[in-house]
Image (tube, helix red, strand yellow):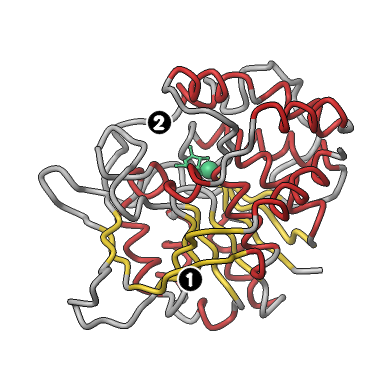
Amino acid sequence: KPQLLIDTDPGVDDALAILMAHAHADVLGLTIAAGNVGLAHTVRNARTLVDLVGTPTPVFAGCPTPLVRMPEEDAVHVHGVDGLGDVGFAEPQAVASAEHAAHAILRLTREHPGLTLVALGPLTNLALALRLDPALPQRVTRLVVMGGAVTGQGNTGKIPAEFNIGFDPEAAHVVFEAFPMFDLVDWEATLRHAFIDEDFDAWLAAGDKRAAFFGQVFGTARAFNRQRGRRGVIAADALAMAVALDPDIVTRSEQRHVAVELDGRLTRGATVVDWLGRLGQPANARIVMEVDQARFAAMVRRALGA
Ligand code: BDR
Ligand code: CA
């Protein structure tokens, strides 16, 4: 079983990814970022998920704001005001640890060298951890990041940017510069790997309490995507989690140098991919272009108990 440490801002698709992780791997901890909604909500949602899966997975609260500039938007319109579809869950039993997420990332990577880091939200905690200890990349086997829009078809108010990177571009810059190689699952890959609505509904109907939970939290996100004219079930963080759990699921990837635009009149937060190798910089990212959709589906089904 792979050992995972997950940095996340749950988040509806984060929730699905966290269910997948617990079904297929040892989850050493959830370090929590602000992003989709504020930190108080994302921490509480992580605790709700820990109650649901019934494991003692530790939860560590991280940074409440981006490193430098305050965000211009959250994702309440997608994930609900509480970040999990405004279902109104009771106060969870699981408690968050007193240790800061950035410290927990450093400690857990020392205690479990070779683990896989998975980043499903803005990269604030990871950037802070890297500034505290630049040797961090040497202790992990892989870093998988859900973020970016490699040809500029983003999903935030800033046209070419993707939410996780656009929320904290400076943090993404720190992380992209620090890791010699990481796997990047971008928003555009997510759109190419949506599930057919009827298939997904059948899994929800056939599954156990995890499917019932996801069916409840998923309403606002589904309605938002439909209103945007997108068909199918889009689950960005679940796709990144599939890549983290099974690297062999990737059937096509491109290794390129990827940087983050920090200024830009229109492009702050954009992921700039040097497709033609003009910068003469070594590739730092394996950009996931295509995964085996049937295997991805099987992983999601198992996570829902279907
Ligand atoms: C990313 O932003 C969040 O809203 C999702 O949870 C995902 O991590 C997609 O752009
Ligand atoms: Ca997320």
> Could you tell which of marks 2 and 1 lies nearer the N-terminus?
2
Does 190 sit left or right of 265 as displayed?
Answer: right
Looking at the image, residue 246 lies above or below residue 296: below
Looking at the image, residue 282 lies above or below residue 194: below
**Residue lying at 87% horizontally and 30% vertically, measured from the top left:** 206
| Residue that numbered label 1 is attached to | 182
Does residue 98 appear in the picture of this structure? no
Label 1: how many Cα within 10 Å (few below 14, some 14–19, many 20+): many
Instruction: Give coordinates of residue 177: x percent, y percent.
Output: 34, 72
| Residue that numbered label 2 is attached to | 74
Q: Are marks 2 and 1 in contact (CB under 8 Å)?
A: no
Label 2: how many Cα within 10 Å (few below 14, some 14–19, many 20+): some
Answer with the quarter of the image where residue 246 lies. Answer: bottom right
Does residue 173 appear in the picture of this structure? yes
Does 45 sit left or right of 185 as displayed?
Answer: right
Does 109 sit left or right of 19 as displayed?
Answer: left
- Please state, as top left, top right, bottom left or bottom right, where the C terminus lies in the image: top right
Q: Is the distance from the Cβ of mark 1 to the nearest ligand 1 atom less than 8 Å?
A: no
**Residue lying at 36% horizontally and 43% vertically, measured from the top left:** 167
- Residue at disc 1, secondary structure: strand
**Residue lying at 70% horizontally and 57% vertically, measured from the top left:** 29
Instruction: Give coordinates of residue 242: x percent, y percent.
Output: 66, 56
Instruction: Give coordinates of residue 21: x percent, y percent.
Output: 74, 53
**Residue lying at 66% horizontally and 39% vertically, measured from the top left:** 15
Q: Amino acid at mark 1?
A: Phe
- Please state, as top left, top right, bottom left or bottom right, where the N terminus lies in the image: bottom right
248, 260: nearer the viewer: 248
42, 202: nearer the viewer: 202
Q: Residue furthest left?
A: 265
